[in-house]
Image (cartoon, rainbow, N blue to C red):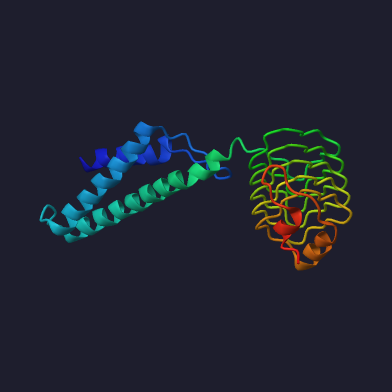
């Protein structure tokens, strides 16, 4: 009985459960997941019975079996943890990923780019007019002369980005992180920076030319920047 349990448990752990180390992708179906949980529960009960009962009268054998059960339990729980931790990675399989990509003059106008990743991407002259970049990650991106008119960057991570000469007219940066980003000569007419994190020096520069009211949020650019 114990050997059958060992064989069944190790089959689930070593055969049915096949994690990919790089992506944490696993091909575990719901029945296999339930089977793994059942094995963990059964192994725990077996451990309790062996430890507290008089089934085994040989101390050395009892100690060896307990060690073996402990090992199987640890491996099973580790597999379960990886399985649970894999869910966020699996959810990212369809994420738009343009890390370090050359996107010069590319047209992304009116495109759904929610949660997209553009880390260190070269986006000079790119067209993001009316695009939805909510929660996008654009760290270290280059957007020199890019068109982001009416784009939604709410909650986006846009730190260390170059917006020089960019068209940010009516763009929405609500709750965005814009630390160490540059906006020299960028058109920010009607842009909404409400609750965005921006360096004080950049805020002072932006306030000097802040005009207009965002047509979507109806918040004045000066008000969103906290200009005095």
- Residue 110: x and y in percent read 73, 33
Left or right: 157 as drawn, with respect to 12:
right
Left or right, 19 with respect to 64, comes to: right
Instruction: Relative to 196, say whether 19 is above or below.
Output: above
Q: Relative to residue 118, is residue 125 drawn left or right?
A: right
Q: How many marks?
A: 0
**What percent of the width, then of the height, locates residue 177?**
68, 56
Left or right: where 166 falls relative to 58: right
- Using the image as rendered, state which of residue 117 and residue 42 is in the foreground: 117
Q: Which residue is at a point 82% across and 58% down the rendered structure image?
A: 182
Q: Is residue 47 above or below residue 134?
A: below
State the image quarter where residue 12 is shown. Answer: top left
Q: Quadrant of the N terminus?
A: top left
Which of these two is toward me, 211 or 78? 211
Q: Quadrant of the C terminus?
A: bottom right
Q: Quadrant of residue 227?
A: bottom right
| Residue that lies at the very extreme toward the left in this rendered image | 54
Q: Position of residue 144 (x, y in %)?
A: 87, 48
Q: Name the one closer to the observer, 58 or 207.
A: 207
Q: What residue is shown at x 83% (from left), y 39% (from top)?
A: 126
Give the image location of residue 159, x and y in percent: 73, 56
Residue shown at 28% from the left, 41% from the top: 38
């Amino acid at each position: 009985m114990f050997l059958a349990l060992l064989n069944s448990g190790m089959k689930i752990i070593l055969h049915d459960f096949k994690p990919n180390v790089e992506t944490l992708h696993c091909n575990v179906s719901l029945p296999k997941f339930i089977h793994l949980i059942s094995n963990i529960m059964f192994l725990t009960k077996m451990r309790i019975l062996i430890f507290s009962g008089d089934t085994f009268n040989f101390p050395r054998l009892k100690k060896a079996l307990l060690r073996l059960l402990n090992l199987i339990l640890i491996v099973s729980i580790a597999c379960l943890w990886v399985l649970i931790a894999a869910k966020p990675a699996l959810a990212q399989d369809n994420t738009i990923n343009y890390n370090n990509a050359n996107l010069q003059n590319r047209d992304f106008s009116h495109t759904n780019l929610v949660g997209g990743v553009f880390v260190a991407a070269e986006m000079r002259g790119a067209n993001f007019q009316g695009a939805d970049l909510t929660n996008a990650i654009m760290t270290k991106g280059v957007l020199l002369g890019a068109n982001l008119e009416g784009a939604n960057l709410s909650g986006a991570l846009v730190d260390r980005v170059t917006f020089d000469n960019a068209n940010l007219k009516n763009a929405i940066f609500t709750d965005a992180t814009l630390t160490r980003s540059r906006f020299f000569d960028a058109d920010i007419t009607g842009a909404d920076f409400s609750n965005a994190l921006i360096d004080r020096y950049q805020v002072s520069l932006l306030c000097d030319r802040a005009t207009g009211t965002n047509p979507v949020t109806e918040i004045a650019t000066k008000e969103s920047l906290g200009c005095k």
